[in-house]
Amino acid sequence: MSLKDQIQIERLPKHIAVIMDGNGRWAKEKGMPRIFGHRNAIQSVREVSEGCAELGVSYLTLYTFSTENWNRPADEVGGLMTLFGQTLVKETETLLKNGIRLTVCGDTSRLPKAVFDKMQEVIEITSKGERMGLNLALSYSGRWDITQAARKLAQQVKDGKMNPEDIDENTFANSLVTAGMPDPELLIRTSGELRISNFLMWQLAYSELYFTDKYWPDFRKEDLYEAILDYQHRERRFGKTSEQLSK
């Protein structure tokens, strides 16, 4: 029996988030520049996106580029932006074929205009995809997200559109850039690092965390299935006891 056949579809996470880590180290071990690792990571994105859509996952969020990544060497940042624009063009047909709609969350005002325009075009073209939402966290950080949500709510209070006592977890969550999506039940991080790196800090409050030593360019559908099976063997209590869940 394959790993895919062992997955219980009725216990599938609705939303999976992935920190795609290790591209640079993967390339370095092969004696190649870092951008070589980023290029080879595209196949992993394709496989995991298709794998999630085939299983019936509703949302997949990929940590594509953090706000901190802008501090990397200019040639690497430029190469990443060029690669992102090229990939959008090449993968549009794959998204359409698989019924996947593209969304992007992050401070997209910092993107080069050509990349931003192409991104908006692909978002529009794929907007009717009903099989799965592929959400790219681009120029994103959890602290930025929480800060912009707080600023948005503060402005509404200042404008008299709400009272401070109206602010609760739901109103705050609806001010985050992931509003309308369920929180991820499963976070996958590749490359052996054991941290969330400023990613979806509010949304990951009760997510199950799965870490693998594999670098992202080597991550394939079977690795995705293994992560989901690990998730399905865990007991999610949300502060309750095992005895309460069994009643």
Image: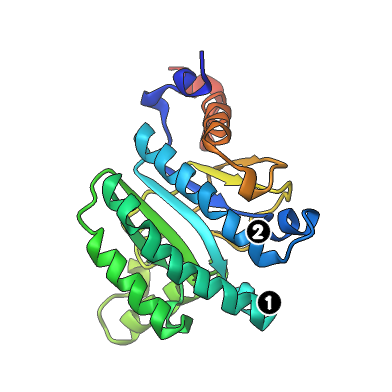
Q: Badge 2: few (under 14), some or many (20 or more) residues near its Cα, within 10 Å?
A: many
Q: Earlier in the sequence, mark 1 or mark 2?
A: 2
Give the vertical position of 96 relative to 154 (above or below): above
Tally of numbered discs: 2
Tell which of 173 and 3 is nearer to you: 3
Q: How is the image coloured?
A: rainbow
Q: Does any portion of residue 188 appear in the rendered image?
A: yes
Residue position for label 2: 37
Q: Which marked residue is nearer to the observer: mark 1 or mark 2? A: 2
Task: Tell me the distance, in whole angstroms, between the alpha carbons under discs 1 and 2.
Answer: 15 Å
User: Identity of the amino acid at label 1?
Assistant: Arg
Tell which of 8 and 153 is nearer to you: 8
Where in the figure is residue 182, as x and y percent of width and height?
37, 48
Q: Quadrant of residue 117?
A: bottom left
Where in the figure is residue 118, as x and y percent of width and height?
35, 74
Of the 4 image quadrants, the one containing the C terminus is top left
Q: Mark 1 and 2 residues: CB-CB less than 8 Å, in contact?
A: no
- Residue at x-position 36% and y-position 71%: 119
For this view, does 22 lie left or right of residue 28? left
Residue position for label 1: 72
**Residue 106's mark?**
none
Where in the figure is residue 81, as x and y percent of width and height?
52, 74
Q: Does any portion of residue 205 appear in the rendered image?
A: no
Q: Residue furthest top?
A: 1
Q: Residue furthest left?
A: 128
Q: Quadrant of residue 73?
A: bottom right
Give the vertical position of 18 relative to 241 (above or below): below
- Residue at x-position 40% and y-position 64%: 88
User: Identity of the amino acid at label 2?
Assistant: Gly
